[in-house]
Amino acid sequence: MSKTISYLKIGLYNFAVVIILFLLLEFAVRLFLPQIQPSFTSGELIEENKFGDSHGIKNSSCGESNGVKKCSDENGFWKYTSQKDSTASKVLIIGDSVTMGIGVESDSTFAGLMNNNLSHISVLNPSLIAYTGSDYKNVIRQLLSSEEIKFDRAILAWSLNDLYPRHPIESAPGIVSDNFFGNSVRLVRKNFRVYHLLKNLFTDRKREYFEYDKSFYSRENENFQLALSDIKEISDVLRDRNIPLKVLLMPYEYQLRMSNDSIYYPQHILSQELGKLDIPVIDCKDAFLEGANHSADYYLYGDGIHFSNLGHRELFQYLRSIHNKSAL
């Protein structure tokens, strides 16, 4: 009996030591690596079924996204510092969490920088986490039917994972099931920075995300064809209103890291097919290829999809140079 008690004490002691060391490591990560932020967007920002069966930004709301505060205006667009008068050209910029700018203050996203630094442009940005091609179609159709909201041009910022079905595929990297294990993983992602540090040190999830998403980009793939259909439908409905559309193609970190032209095959095939539909395309990889920074610097820590402050700034500067050439 005494031996059992001794073993129990030793076990509890070791467990306590492990917990203390873990908490000390978590404290150190938060202190010395502030760029590591929790992966979480608060539900206060999201309204379910706002655009038919697509979710949307809740009007006049504030919440947190990957450690930064986000606020929306009374129409459900991200709020920026610069408020334009009625003479400014209204540009709708729609995308997913990349264009929403998770982990980056709204004024520091490329859309916010466009709004605040291009005097004749007023940006309307309804972009939201988990949007796909079908969501873009739902949002644009409903906005066009609004009497209060008008825009002169539209920009669709396309990420490679935008051709997922409406709900992410269970086998996709980073997707966890809605069960006890999955909920535990979500809890760890949200609260512990050590998790993100270790994942980045011992795995290459950026490559895994790219390799998985790349597999959808073939002319024979059903999801690819559905994505083309969604974009064509968006273009057609905008043309009916004489509203020009441009599509921005966003690069992944792994593509910039590898630095060879064949790695951009997904963007190439999408650009070719959209060209056949007479839909203008801007390949945004050119915003980063000439920079002196490491490819990872353009993205959030451990993230191969979402831009950092630097990434958004480089993209804005590239788009501004295009705007100055009257191409945007």
Image (cartoon, grey):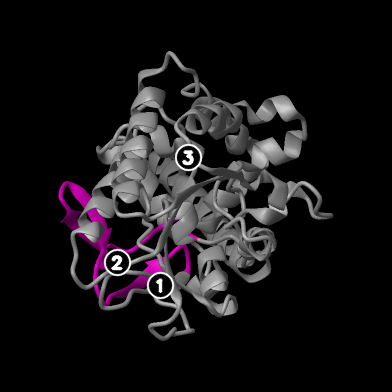
Between 296 and 193, the residue placed more toward the observer is 296
Q: Which residue is mark 2?
A: 45
Q: Which amino acid type is shown beneath numbered disc 2?
A: Leu
Labels 1, 3: front one = 3
Crowd band around label 2 with a 10 angstrom C-alpha radius: few (<14), some (14–19), many (20+): many
Q: Quadrant of the C terminus?
A: bottom right
Ranked by sequence position, the earlier of labels 2 and 3 is: 2
> Residue 270, relative to residue 138: is it above or below?
above
Residue at 67 percent of width and 43 percent of height = 201
Pointers 1 and 3 in contact (C-beta within 8 Å): no
Give residue 279's position: percent from left, percent from top.
47, 40
Q: Which residue is mark 3?
A: 279
Mark 1 vs mark 3, CA separation in Å:
32 Å
Crowd band around label 1 with a 10 angstrom C-alpha radius: few (<14), some (14–19), many (20+): many
Pointers 2 and 1 in contact (C-beta within 8 Å): yes
Between 161 and 193, the residue placed more toward the observer is 161
**Can you tell which mark lies on residue 70?**
1
